[in-house]
Amino acid sequence: MDPTLLLLRWAHILAAIALMGGLVFTRFALVPAVFDLDATTRDRIHDAVRRRWLPWVIAAITVLLASGLANFLLFNGRVKAEGWADGQWMRQTSYHALFGAKFLLALVAFYFASALVGRGEGTQWVRNDRAKWSSVTLGLALAVVLLSGWMRQLHTGPNQIESGGVGMPSGTSRVDGEMGVDSGEGSDRSANRYRDGRAGSVFRDPAAGGSETAPATAPAQ
């Protein structure tokens, strides 16, 4: 794996863990704990938490936006460069639409996460009902995580032929115990049989008389 992609992925995951963990703590620990306190004490506690938590929220949102966009652009370039599904993979899997939906949900979640720790009068309505809006924000964050998991399952890329337990590029086979190159009609039939642009598994075609396939994995986003 490319070290740059690995670092971006680590940064993205760690920032998501920090932000979502803070939301879980706020909704299920902090808000219930201060509910029975008087207003003055409750506001003082929230203000103390806000001063310490706000820099983490800003940092997490910045890292998520930067690493998420970088991951998408790099993955998009890789798909085009390798010609997945003859350049039609993004359209066939609706990957751009899924990314757009994920991005919009994330922006809304970022707005509420910022408002929960903000001080401006324009977002005071969010802090007036912290239990409700922290639940909404947590739900949005969960939706983003689930959508990200769905998109991750699409990162399988073109398939390759599996022969004798060893992955082989399409068009090669074992001949008399040695690795050889197919020729003629058999080679074309084998290559065409496995040249499927869809990501994921391809079912074996008994009529074609070949071996099973094993999807090759593309770099994680």
Image (cartoon, rainbow, N blue to C red):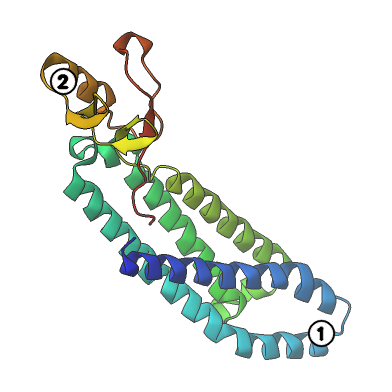
Which of the pair 118/203 is nearer the observer? 203
x, y (%) of residue 16? Answer: 53, 67
Whether 64 is drawn above or below 144: the answer is below
Q: Residue at x 61, y 75 (%)?
A: 116
Residue assigned mark 2? 188
x, y (%) of residue 100? Answer: 37, 51
Residue assigned mark 1? 39
Q: Is residue 119 visible?
A: no
Which of the pair 36/197 is nearer the observer? 197
Q: Which mark is residue 90?
A: none
Which of the pair 59/112 is nearer the observer? 59
Q: Quadrant of the N terminus?
A: bottom left
> Farthest residue in the left direction?
184
Label 2 CA crowd tier, 10 Å (few <14, some 14–19, many 20+): few
Label 2–label 1 contact, CB within 8 A: no
Give left or right: position of 188 versus 52: left
x, y (%) of residue 99? Answer: 38, 51
Q: How many marks overall?
A: 2
Q: Quadrant of residue 192?
A: top left
Label 1 CA crowd tier, 10 Å (few <14, some 14–19, many 20+): few
Residue type at mark 2?
Asp
Whether 116 is drawn above or below 175: the answer is below
Whether 198 is drawn above or below 193: the answer is below
Q: Residue at x 80, y 90 (%)?
A: 40
Chain-order first, disc 2 or disc 1: 1
Q: Residue at x 32, y 69 (%)?
A: 4
Q: Give the structural element (helix, strand or loop) at label 1.
A: helix
Give left or right: position of 38 versus 190: right
Give left or right: position of 46 versus 37: left
Q: Quadrant of the C terminus?
A: bottom left
What's the CA distance linking mark 2 and mark 1?
A: 76 Å
> Farthest residue in the right direction?
36
